[in-house]
Image: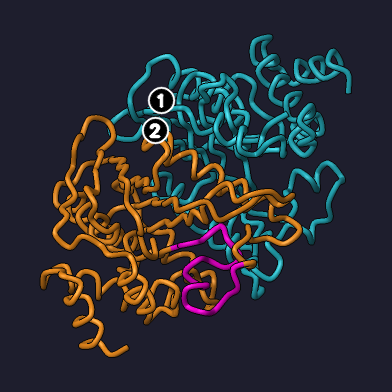
Chain colours: A cyan, B orange
C-alpha cells in the first residue's frame, strides 16, 4: 500500500488529519520493521471494525494509577494520548491502566517513551486466543510484553514479545494459520502460557474483565545497559534493533 | 534432607534462629513445589558461598523507587525484608530495586505479597548464563519473571517463569546439563532471549551493572481474574497452583 493510498483510506473512515497521521505512522513503522501483522494490513482490518473517529479518550483518574477510558476511541489513538501525557508531565514513576483495543505493536509505544528518557514496561490483553497447552478453549490473549530502555548511546533498546507462536496479526496478514495461535515454546509452551496468564491477570487487576493495557513508566537511574549489551553482543542482532 | 538437619546446617553457617527459619521456609517451599533447583540442594550450595550471617540489608531511599542495599546479606533475607516492609506500610503503588543475590524462586515472594493483597511483578537478574540464540558468549541472566495476583477466592494465582530451558538451579540439583541453560522456546528461543534482555535492562536501569531485583507492588482494583480463570480452566492445571 502506498502512503497516500493508506492515508486516504484512513481519512475515508472519518479520522481527522492529525489522527490519520498518528495511525499511519504506527502502521507504517510496523510495516518497515517487518511486523506485517500490525502494518498496512491493519488498515483493511480497521475498515471492517467501523471505528468511531470522533471518540475521544479521557483520563479519569491519576490517584496511584492513572486511569484512562477509551470512550470508544481506537486503541492506537488512546495509546498515543497516553504516551503524550506521560512524556508531557514527567513523574519518577507512573502506572497507567486503560481499556485500549487494539493496541498495535507495543514496541512502538515503548520506543516512544524510551526516546523520551523513560523506562517503559507495557503489556496488553486481547480477546482469548491462547488455550492451555493441555487443551480446552482459549483462556487468555496473546498478551505481548514490551520493554523500552533508554540508552546512553541514544538508541533505545526495545523488546516486544508476544506469548503466541504466531499472532492474530500474522493470521490477518496471511502469514500464519489460525492453529498457530498457541503459546510459543514447543515442549515448554507452558512457560509462554504462564506468562500470558500472569500478564492477563496484571491488566485485569486494574481494569476488570475488559481488554486493555497496563503501563509502567519510570525514570531510570542509569542508561548504560543497551550500549554495553550491544558492545558485548559484537554484532549479533539484538531485539528491536534495525 | 530432613527439616531438623536442614535447620542445623543453616545454623552452622552462623545464621540466627529467625533467619534460619526464613531460609528454611523458602527452601522447603521450593522443595514441596517440586522446584528442586531452589530447594534443599541450595543449602549445600550456600555452604560453598561463605555467606555473611551478620550482614543486614538497609533501605537507602524511598524517593520514587525504594532502594535497598544488601550490604552483603544473602538475597533471600533481603527479599524477605523487602516483602515485610512493603506489606507493613501499604502504598497504592511501589517500585523496589535492590542488589539481591541469590533470590531463590521468585514465585515465593510474589505469593507472599499477593497473600497480603498486593499485585506483584518481580524479576531478578543473575550472572550471565544465556547466550544469544545465534551463538557467542552468555550475555544475560536466566532472569525469571514472577507475577502474583490476589484472588477473590482467597488463593493467589502465581506465575514464575525462567527464561531458560533449564535453570542453573536445575543444574545444581543434578536435573539438567549445563548446555541446557539456553533460552527456552526451541525455534522461537529468540523470544525468551528477548524477554531476558528486556528484564535485565529493566533491573539495570535502576541498579546499574549489578545483579538484583526489580519489584512492582500495587493495590489491585479487583481480584476476580484468578477465580474466573480457574472456573474457565475447568480443572486444567494453572501456573503455581497445587
* Residue A142 appears in view: no
Residue A154, above or below A198: above
Crowd band around label 2 with a 10 angstrom C-alpha radius: few (<14), some (14–19), many (20+): many
Going 62% across and 56% down the picture, which residue do you hit?
A128
Same chain under badges 1 and 2? The reply is yes
Foreground residue, A157 or B111? A157
Could you say where residue A205 lies in the image, as x and y percent from the top left? 39, 50
Foreground residue, B48 or A81? B48
Q: State yes or no: residue A58 in magenta.
A: no
For this orientation, the residue located farthest to the bottom is B2
Q: Secondary structure at mark 2?
A: strand
In the visual, does A23 lie left or right of B47? right
Asked if the residue under mark 2 is in contact with the one under mark 1, i.e. CB atoms within 8 Å, the reply is: yes
Crowd band around label 1 with a 10 angstrom C-alpha radius: few (<14), some (14–19), many (20+): some
Residue position marked by numbered label 2 in the rendering: A67
Going 84% across and 55% down the picture, which residue do you hit?
A177
Give me the chain letter of mark 2: A
Q: Which residues are magenta?
A: B159-178
Residue position marked by numbered label 1 in the rendering: A59
Foreground residue, B93 or B75? B75
Quadrant of the drawing holding the C terminus of chain A: top right
The quadrant where residue A236 appears:
top right
Residue A72, above or below A13: below
Going 47% across and 52% down the picture, which residue do you hit?
B127
In the visual, does A194 lie left or right of A128? left
Amino acid at each position: 500500500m502506498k502512503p497516500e493510498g493508506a492515508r486516504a483510506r484512513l481519512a475515508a473512515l472519518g479520522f481527522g488529519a492529525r489522527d490519520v497521521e498518528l495511525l499511519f505512522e504506527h502502521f507504517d513503522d510496523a510495516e518497515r520493521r517487518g511486523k506485517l501483522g500490525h502494518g498496512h494490513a491493519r488498515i483493511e482490518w480497521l475498515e471492517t471494525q467501523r471505528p468511531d473517529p470522533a471518540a475521544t479518550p479521557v483520563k479519569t483518574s491519576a490517584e496511584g494509577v492513572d486511569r484512562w477510558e477509551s470512550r470508544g476511541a481506537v486503541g492506537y489513538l488512546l495509546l498515543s494520548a497516553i504516551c503524550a501525557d506521560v512524556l508531557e508531565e514527567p513523574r519518577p514513576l507512573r502506572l497507567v491502566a486503560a481499556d485500549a483495543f487494539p493496541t498495535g505493536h507495543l514496541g512502538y509505544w515503548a520506543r516512544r517513551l524510551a526516546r523520551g528518557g523513560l523506562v517503559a514496561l507495557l503489556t496488553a490483553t486481547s480477546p482469548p486466543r491462547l488455550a492451555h497447552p493441555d487443551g480446552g478453549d482459549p483462556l487468555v490473549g496473546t498478551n505481548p510484553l514490551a520493554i523500552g530502555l533508554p540508552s546512553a548511546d541514544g538508541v533505545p533498546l526495545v523488546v516486544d514479545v508476544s506469548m503466541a507462536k504466531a499472532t492474530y496479526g500474522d493470521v490477518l496478514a496471511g502469514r500464519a494459520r489460525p492453529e498457530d495461535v498457541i503459546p510459543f515454546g514447543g515442549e515448554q509452551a507452558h512457560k509462554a502460557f504462564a506468562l500470558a496468564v500472569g500478564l492477563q491477570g496484571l491488566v485485569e487487576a486494574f481494569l476488570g474483565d475488559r481488554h486493555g493495557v497496563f503501563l509502567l513508566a519510570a525514570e531510570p537511574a542509569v542508561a548504560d545497559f543497551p550500549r554495553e549489551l550491544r558492545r558485548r553482543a559484537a554484532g549479533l542482532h539484538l531485539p528491536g534493533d534495525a
